[in-house]
Image: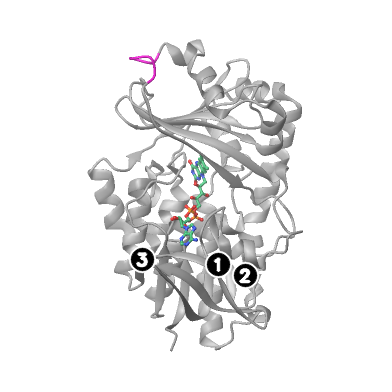
Amino acid sequence: MSEKRDVIVSGAGPSGAATAAMLAQKGYDVLLYDRYDFPRDKVCGDAVPAGAVALLRGLGMGEKIDRAEAEGKFYPLDGLRIFSPRGYEMRAEFGDHENNSRSYVAPRMHFDATVQAHAVDSGAEFRVGTVKKPLLENGRVVGVTVAENGTTRDILARVVVGADGVTSPLARTLRPKSDQHKDMHRAVALRAYIEDLEEYPGEVEFYLYKEILPGYAWIFPTGLNQANIGLGMRLDHFRQRKEKLEGLLDQFLAMPAIKKRLKRGGQLRDVATWQLNFGSQKNLQHAYDGALLVGDAAGFINPLTGGGIHNGLLSAQAAATTLHEALQADDTSLNRLKIYEKRVHDSMWDSMKRAFTMQRWFLRLPILVDILARQMGNNNALARMFLTKL
Ligand SMILES: Cc1cc2nc3c(=O)[nH]c(=O)nc-3n(C[C@H](O)[C@H](O)[C@H](O)COP(=O)(O)OP(=O)(O)OC[C@H]3O[C@@H](n4cnc5c(N)ncnc54)[C@H](O)[C@@H]3O)c2cc1C
């Protein structure tokens, strides 16, 4: 007889682990799968905004977050600098220390392990296994097929959550072929860690220059002379440019403003690329008969900033609320779950739309970035107001 659980969550990144924690805290029998054990790396800029931290604190993670900060695993942030194509600089302080929920650069090796551990502490069962596909019965998801400990088997669940990232096998099976992200709503990005760069303590840096707009290069410090460094480009522009991201990073490191801050010529480790699916494409389906998609599996990344952790957590919250109601009513049909579409739309769509509009203007008129950076300069209040609208 097949095993049967209340909820199976495929993928224990922040979106999946948070969904699992929320549902386990409500007393459901939650089985959380990831193809890797934790801690494990995930290609990312590692910037975790205060809103995401506040949400995790609300889940009871306060002590874990404070400990990670005290141990130097989460690097606290005070502000940011944006550099425009012509080199104008805009600085802003985050001013978001209320409720103890400041922003961090939290390398995913540490960050994800912390959230995953919280899911387990909340009562979810974690297993290492690769989910191959949803198990379907008359078009309805009734479980998953998973490869675990060298065998492949089926596990049943009242409901399944696809939190298995951009390459989600659940999304691939459930979404019709016509319902995929178009290149203008996707990006590719390269991330590395640099170990000999003089950082601006407590500040993240964004470089918006003509060659990669509407993408950008970033330097996000993780400690003394150490940073997460990388760059990302919209996929359609990347295809047109026909250059490798590694070459573009070399060009970035060779810029005089960066080169002079390198102590030993630029010592990089863990160079890796990955893809991003934006939440700016309309009418994609995220709720199915017996299943929901959250985080990157659904494609909820901000099209201007490339940030996806906060949106992933917001979608986890919407999913947990929806599934709690559905499980209470013993009805996990699409008809019952489709309220999830409205919930994620209400919590994210306005900011996605604004960010995509801004991205298009930046692309057409790089001079606009210069004007904004010049106008805002050190006007912290104006810069903060502008940035919080993104
Ligand atoms: C280069 C780069 C830089 C970025 N920088 C930032 C940033 O600074 N700040 C920010 O907020 N966002 C950033 N993002 C976006 C961010 O990384 C994602 O939005 C975020 O990781 C989404 O979390 P998730 O839990 O939905 O998915 P993921 O973090 O991708 O987690 C998915 C999990 O599913 C597991 N999995 C995959 N397939 C299977 C399977 N078949 N079976 C079982 N498990 C599976 C994976 O191992 C993984 O643990 C960046 C993205 C990239 C590519």
How far apart are the two marked residues, 3 and 2, measured between alpha carbons?
22 Å
Question: In the rendered view of the protein, which quadrant contains the N terminus?
Answer: bottom left
The correct choice, above or below, for 382 with respect to 27 in the image is above
Q: Quadrant of residue 29?
A: bottom left
User: Which of the two residues, 361 or 268, is positioned nearer the viewer here?
Assistant: 268
Residue 115 visible in the shown view:
yes
Q: Which residue is mark 3?
A: 119
Write down the residue under mark 1: 318
Q: Nearer the viewer, residue 382 or 44?
A: 44
Callout 3 environment at 10 Å: few (<14), some (14 to 19), or many (20+)?
Answer: many
Residue 359 location (% of width, % of height): 69, 36
Q: Which residues are magenta?
A: 261-266
Is residue 320 found left or right of 351 in the rendered image? left
Marking on residue 340: 2
The residue at 66%/78% (across/down) is 334
- Residue 204 included in the magenta stretch of the image: no
User: Would you call the spot at circle 1 few (<14 residues within 10 Å), some (14-19), or many (20 or more)?
Assistant: many
